[in-house]
Image (spheres, rainbow, N blue to C red):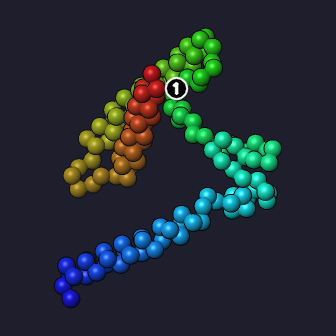
Amino acid sequence: MTRHSLDSRLLRVLILQLFIAAPLIAAAGPPTSLALGLPAGITVTRQGASVGQQIPLPTEQPPIRQNEPLPGLKEKQKRELMKANYEKMKRDADELASLAKSLQEDVDKSNENVLSLHIVEKAEKIEKLAKRIKSVAKGY
């Protein structure tokens, strides 16, 4: 068989399966309380649960960025948190500069035939530090 006829045959089989499966899935209805691990007789909807018990479905909350001040903090606490983040970023930047300088010295000491594992480890540490600084800076 040619590739085109195989693709066409596969497509027909998939369409046929879709037409057979769709009514079966629709007839099954929403998940039962037992399937959700709830006691029998309790049904869950978007508004909550029936039989007098309220079991609302979980709602999605917007994600909180890592360095963003938490909602509900007082203004003074926010300022202190921002200042602490700035000081940490400043220390990390100083460490990054010294690591980059020492990496340059290590590379100057080696030659094109020999690069030590120490150089690779230092470069990875620089990369992690740079990513951390970037993450903190994005929090502002």
Q: Check the image and report above or below for 104 versus 49.
A: above
User: Where, by quadrant of the figure, is residue 1 drawn?
Assistant: bottom left
Spot occupied by residue 89 in the image (x, y as percentages of width and height)? 46, 25
Residue drawn at 59 percent across, 24 percent down: 70
On the rendered structure, is 44 left or right of 94? right
Q: Secondary structure at mark 1?
A: loop
Q: Residue furthest bottom?
A: 1
Can you identify the residue that label 1 sits on? 68
**Would residue 21 be found to the left or right of residue 35 on screen?**
left
Outermost top residue: 76
Side of 77 relative to 83 (left or right) = right
Which residue occupies the foreground of this view, 124 or 79? 79
Q: Is residue 113 above or below residue 46?
A: below
Residue 14: name its quadrant: bottom left
Which residue does the image show at 32% across and 77% down from the upper left? 12
Residue 93 lies, in percent from the top left, at: 41, 26
Q: Is residue 102 above or below residue 28?
A: above
Query: Where does the image place residue 82, in percent across and percent down from the top left?
Result: 52, 18
| Placement of 72 over or under 40, stated as above or below | above
Q: Pinpoint residue 136: horizontal percent, then vertical percent.
A: 46, 28
Relative to residue 25, is residue 48 drawn left or right? right
Task: Identify which residue, 10 or 106, lies in the foreground.
Answer: 10
